[in-house]
Each structure stands twice: as C-alpha cells, then as structure tokens.
Amino acid sequence: MNAFAVSFALVSAVALLLLPRRWAPLPLIAGACFMTLGQGIEIGPFSFTVIRLLIAVGVLRVLLRAERLVGGLNALDWTIVLWSLSALVSCVFHTDQVAALITRLGLVYNCAGIYFLLRIFCVSVDDLVRLCRATAFLLALVAVEMIYEHRADYNLFSVFGGVSAVPEFREGRIRASGPFAHSILAGTVGAVMLPLMIGIWRYYRTTSLLGILVCLSIIVSSSSSGPIMSSFFGIAALLLWPYRRQGKRFRWGAASVYLLLLLFMNAPPYYLLARIDIVGGSTGYHRARLIESAFEHLDEWWLGGTDITRHWMATRSVNWDDNKADITNHYLSMGVTGGLPLMLLFIATISKGFAFVGRAMRDEVDLSPRHRFMVWALGSSLFAHTATCISVSYFDQSFVFLYLTLAAIGSARGASELASADLSLERATAALPSVGAVRRYQTQTNMAWARSRKTATSEGSSYHIKRRNDQKQ
C-alpha cells in the first residue's frame, strides 16, 4: 500500500468507528469508489484489500456498539446465510480443497460482510435516501476522472495499481474504467445507481439531477454496450411504476414471450445477446455461446462446481489460469464456484429481493408516496443488476453496489414489518376500552352482585322465619 492508500484506509477506518449509525456506510462506499484492488496487505494466504480491511473495521464497530439488524433476521437474510454456507461446503468438490476454501472464504467475507453491515447501518428508507445522496457526490469524483481518462487516454487511478494506466481501446473508442477492474464494471456501477438517483428526485431534486448526470457520464465514458443495456432495463422498470400492483401479470407475460421465442427461433432465445452491439466491438456471441456450453457440460459442474472450464469455449481464456474460460456471466460464475446449489441460492436471493419490493407495494402500512417510489427504485436497480449478471461477473469492488441494493431492500422490509406491527398494536389498543371504562364496568358489576346477594339473603331469611312459624303451629 502506498502512503495515500494507507492514509485513506486509516481515515476511513476511524470514520467508520466514530460516525453515527446513519453515516457509517459512507466509508465503505468511498472505499469502493476510490481504492483499486491493487491496494491491500497480505496475511499468509489471505489478501486484504482496502475494502476488506474496512469490512473488518465495520464488524469491530458492530461488536463494540452492539448494533443489530432492524426487524431481526428476515427471509432475505437467511437466504444470504444459506448461500454463504453452500459456498463454503462446495470446496470439498474441488481438487485443491485448501485453495478452494480460501477462495470461498474471501467470497463469503466480501458479499455477506458488506450485505450484513449495510443491513445494520441502513435501518429505514430515510437512511437509504441519505446514503444515495452522499453516493452521488462520491461518484461525481469518479465521473470526473473517467471523463478525463476518456479524453486524455490515461487512468489516474493507476497510481494505486490493479488497473492499467492506459485504458482499453476498442473500435475507435477509449473505454474508461476508473478505479474498477474493467470498463464494463465501471459503467455497470453508473447503470445500477441511475434508478436510485432518479428515486431521490422527490427528496432532493438538485442532488438527484447531479446523480443522474454523474451516472450517465460514467456509462458514456465506459463505452460499453452492457452498461447501456443495464440502464435501459433499470429505466424500463421505473416506468412500470403506475403498474406496480400487476407484477404477476408481467412475470407470466415474460415467461410466455420466452416460450414463444423458444418455439419460433432457430437458436435458443439467449442468442439474442449476439445481436446486441450498441457501441461496437461487443462480445455478445461469446456470452450466448457460454450459456450454451454451460448446459452442454452441466454434468461437470452441477453438484459442486468445477476447476476446469477452458474446453467450454474455443476462445477467450483468462490470463491468470490456463484451465479456465472467461466466465462473463455472474450466474454461471456461481455455478462454476459451487454448482447448481450455489447458483440457485444466488437466484433465490435476487428473487426474494423482488418479492420484498412487491410486498412493500401491497402492504397496508401508511408509507408516503415518495417512500414507496424509493422502494420501487430499489427494485428497478435490482432489475438492472439482474440483467447485468447475464453479461458480466462481479470480480472487483463493484460487488458492493449489488449487495448495497439487496441490503437496502432487506432493511426496507424490516422497517415495514416493524411499522405493520406497530400499526396492529395501535389498532388493537384502540379497540380496547379505556382504563376508566374498565373500572366503571367492574364497579357496576360488583354493585349488581352485592344487590343480588342482599336480595338472596333477605329472601332466605324470610323463608326460614316462615318455616319456624309453621312448625310452631
């Protein structure tokens, strides 16, 4: 780590320990925005990048302050836990089990660590809005650097290592990447944050406008088709806001369209990816062929993943391992890592996130219209992530933004459940009689019982007197 990275890590760590809970996520987001994977320390076989160091500090803060999850563990939290356990167990199916376990420990540490820390720190929709507002300013600095990189053909973040000083050049376009490991991942961050920047329009219009311009600048500077398509998906989901209560119809409609394409297309419908090329130089055919190859070699990886995928594709192997193909699909990356169980649990995590958003739209909790729209923006951002995962695998710090979205959805659901419980308690309390009414009822009951007893006693006494007189006669 160079001097600047050490200073940044120390300041971020102190801020993470001392900031109020609502501002605690900022150092984590700043670490993802400004530090590359080239900065970190090695402890034995474990590599701790700056973002991993900040996760450790965040866990320390939670333990020291005894902070807890809002609403307790919910279904989305348990899905993340099961996904983590599945990832760790899958190491037994690989040749070098120790190396596989170390890799999976890093994966679980990154994803589950960020998810649960952000779940703890973001306890309400207001906290999410505050975090998105701050993220707009953090990403503004990244956007300025990427614009400079796009024009000057030099990446300023290269001083930290982990990224090339000279950005990639394809089809006559410079593809800026900023602090991220690839231009597609940089553009993806802008694409998935765009719906959230639109979501805060009803709270802070100036910041929202800044965030929208920042996200668009990042997308354009990356010069990649994938982020453009992801942003289209996110905006399309936002535009469905007037039809938010008809999610089931849209799901059945999408499934029906896919089945029709399956019937009438000569190739599988996912080969539509090969036809998408917005900025030129797209590798859509590779992504479509990768999906087909994964199905063809399903017997090799379905149970617990595989170590060898080079024979899946004729081209595009990774430069760090001759045995692996370039798995540019996050779902398949989960499958290669831990088999169908891990991949299906990852899909279940995303599905549960969508279910939480849909339930928030149907709940009777009295959410304000802008809060409800912000939750819908979260779902739109998750939809953009879902589309992105088909064409890219999150292999750098960009994973933070995926689990930020999931954590915010989980916290929104937890806050909604607490609000529902409070509303039910309030209604039940309102239905009960007041203390004064209960006391008056008890007094009236006691008086009635005393009168009836007095009457019974009086009648009993008269009866016994009459009986004695009769006996005397």
Image: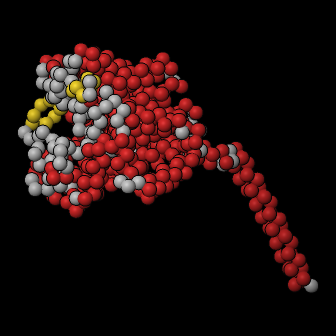
Residue 251, given in percent of the width and then of the height, sits at 49, 51
Horizontal side, residue 200 vs residue 424: left or right? left
Query: Residue at left 29%, top 29%?
Result: 186
Question: Which of these two is toward me, 244 or 290?
Answer: 290
Residue 8, given in percent of the width and then of the height, sits at 21, 21
Question: Which of these two is toward me, 42 or 61?
Answer: 42
Residue at the far left in the pictured view: 44
Q: Is residue 38 above or below residue 73?
A: above
User: Quarter holding the N terminus?
Assistant: top left
**Can residue 222 be seen in this snapshot?**
yes
**Can residue 177 be seen in this snapshot?**
no
Horizontal side, residue 276 vs residue 465: left or right? left
Residue 277 position by quadrant: top left
Residue 378 position by quadrant: top left
Q: Is residue 154 above or below residue 239?
A: above
Residue 376, given in percent of the width and then of the height, sits at 50, 37
Q: What is the image's colouring?
A: secondary structure
Query: Residue at left 25%, top 54%?
Result: 293
Query: Residue at left 42%, top 20%?
Result: 213
Question: Which of these two is toward me, 125 or 36?
Answer: 36
Residue at the far right in the pictured view: 473
Horizontal side, residue 101 vs residue 273: left or right? left
Query: Residue at left 25%, top 18%?
Result: 149
* Tag count: 0
User: Quarter holding the C terminus?
Assistant: bottom right
Question: Which of these two is toward me, 265 or 3?
Answer: 265
Q: Is residue 459 above or below residue 251?
A: below
Residue 411, given in percent of the width and then of the height, sits at 42, 39
